[in-house]
Amino acid sequence: MKILVINGVNLNMLGIREPDKYGSMTLKDLEKELYSYSFELGINLEAFQSNHEGEIVEKIHSAKDNFDGIVINAGAYTHTSVAIRDALLAVEIPTVEVHITNIYKREEFRHHSYLAPVCIGQISGFGVNSYKLGLKAVVDYLSTTKN
């Protein structure tokens, strides 16, 4: 089983940007932790980050027939990007949307996700554990749908 983890805009600033909200873990530290967790789950994992909407769309497109599942934290693009939403819809890969913070306890504009309706689920508010929960959820989903 091969899972793609996509991190969107500003997530390269983890550990620097608003540590009171996002913690002190850097993106590189997060990726190392997720790679370790992937061994526990028995999956292959690839991590990708971009601040550019088009690059994220192209990465999603290239996932077709190459990945079994996607975990995505699109950052602020969650609330603005019809393009990323449509790319996820086009590739038909089971996807879990994740967020470090609870987007529903933040500014009103963050309460709407363009991605959630095309994802199998959404996890937010558990810090970097949101990613682990998202990985476990997509793996469990794929395991039960293949049986």
Image (spheres, rainbow, N blue to C red):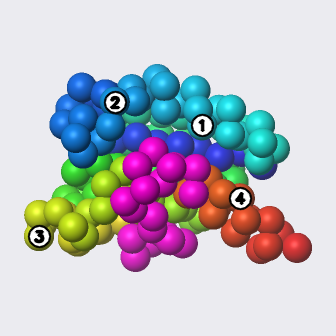
Q: Nearer the viewer, residue 104 or 10?
A: 104
Name the residue beneath numbered marker 3.
108
129 in magenta: yes
- Please name the amino acid that badge 2 sits on: Ser
Write down the residue under mark 2.
24
Q: x%, y% of residue 58?
A: 43, 41
Q: Which mark is residue 115?
A: none
- Name which residue type carries label 3: Glu
Amino acid at the residue labelled 1: Leu
Q: Which of the pair 96/52 is nearer the observer?
A: 96
* Marks 1/4: CA–CA distance: 13 Å
> In whole angstroms, how far apart are the C-alphas of marks 4 and 2?
27 Å
Residue 25 in sight in this render: yes
**Is 92 drawn above or below residue 74 in the view shown?**
below
Where on the picture, by quarter, is residue 10? top left
Q: Position of residue 106 (x, y in %)?
A: 17, 63
Q: CA distance from mark 1 to mark 2?
A: 16 Å
Q: Which residues are magenta?
A: 116-133
